[in-house]
Amino acid sequence: GGLGGGISMNGAAASTAPLTITNSTIANNTTTNGAGIGLSSFGSSAAVIGTITSSTITGNIATSALTNAGYGGGISVPSGSDTLTLDNTIVSGNSMSNGSFDIATVSTATVNANFSALGTSAGYTLSGTSGNNLTGLNASVSALNLGPLSSFTGPTQTIPVIALRYGSTAIDAGDPALNGTADELGNTRPQQTTPNNAPDIGASGPGVRSNA
């Protein structure tokens, strides 16, 4: 138990370098708080900066019954002036009993999100520079039509990923600036140039769509 089931960055060591996550699936972890990612500058006078790009954070379960600000299921930022930046990332389908299912921060932390799918809005406030996000019902697990964690093979590796089933709202809704970059398996974004010439939101888009 503790802060951060999938990834934990906290204390003085966390403030010495930013946390950068790209093309990653963080799923099905369980701990007391921040079951996907825990980001905290507790014990340090310096703020922690976390940047998450083209990743999928889902199915993580925080078991604490505490209702403190910054305590949540998917990503927890329970300290001062830390900054969380999301681009082209899914944070949906996580859980915690206090209702801050997906992202939870203290009021002095900053959350920037663009071209991302954010399942619930409870527990945090988006910055004024955020935009082009899927929110509310459009970012629910059912709308995103996320598949189970399963092994897929790409040009560079075979690893467990979360596929977007056909009909997902995340398909072609990602950040156009990421066109030409590789996804988690090494496939090139975007898979198709119509209708939006945009990549899919999440860690695995091109070539990792599933009917199952």
Image (cartoon, rainbow, N blue to C red):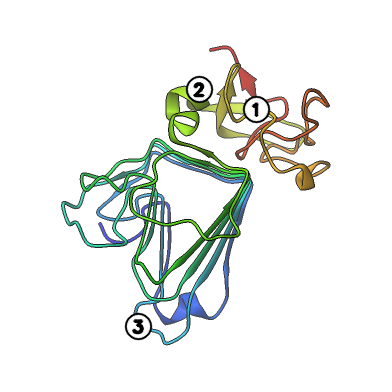
Seen at 63% across and 43% down, the residue is 132
Seen at 71% across and 43% down, the residue is 175
Q: Which residue in the protein does label 1 denote?
A: 171
- Local secondary structure at mark 3: loop
Please indicate whether residue 77 sits to the left or right of residue 169 in the image.
left
Can you name the residue that lies furthest to the left here? Answer: 65
Residue 156 coordinates in the image, percent (x, y): 75, 38
On the image, which quarter does residue 20 sit in?
bottom right
Q: Mark 2: few, some, or many residues within 10 Å (few <14, many ≥20)?
A: some
- Local secondary structure at mark 1: loop
Label 3 or label 2, whichever comes before in sequence order: 3
Number of the front mark, 3 or 2: 2
Q: Which residue in the protein does label 2 denote?
A: 145
Q: CA distance from mark 1 to mark 2?
A: 10 Å
Q: Is residue 2 above or below residue 161?
A: below
Q: Nearer the viewer, residue 1 or 88?
A: 88
Residue 49 coordinates in the image, percent (x, y): 53, 70
Seen at 59% across and 17% down, the residue is 167
In this view of the protein, can residue 146 be seen by the observer? no
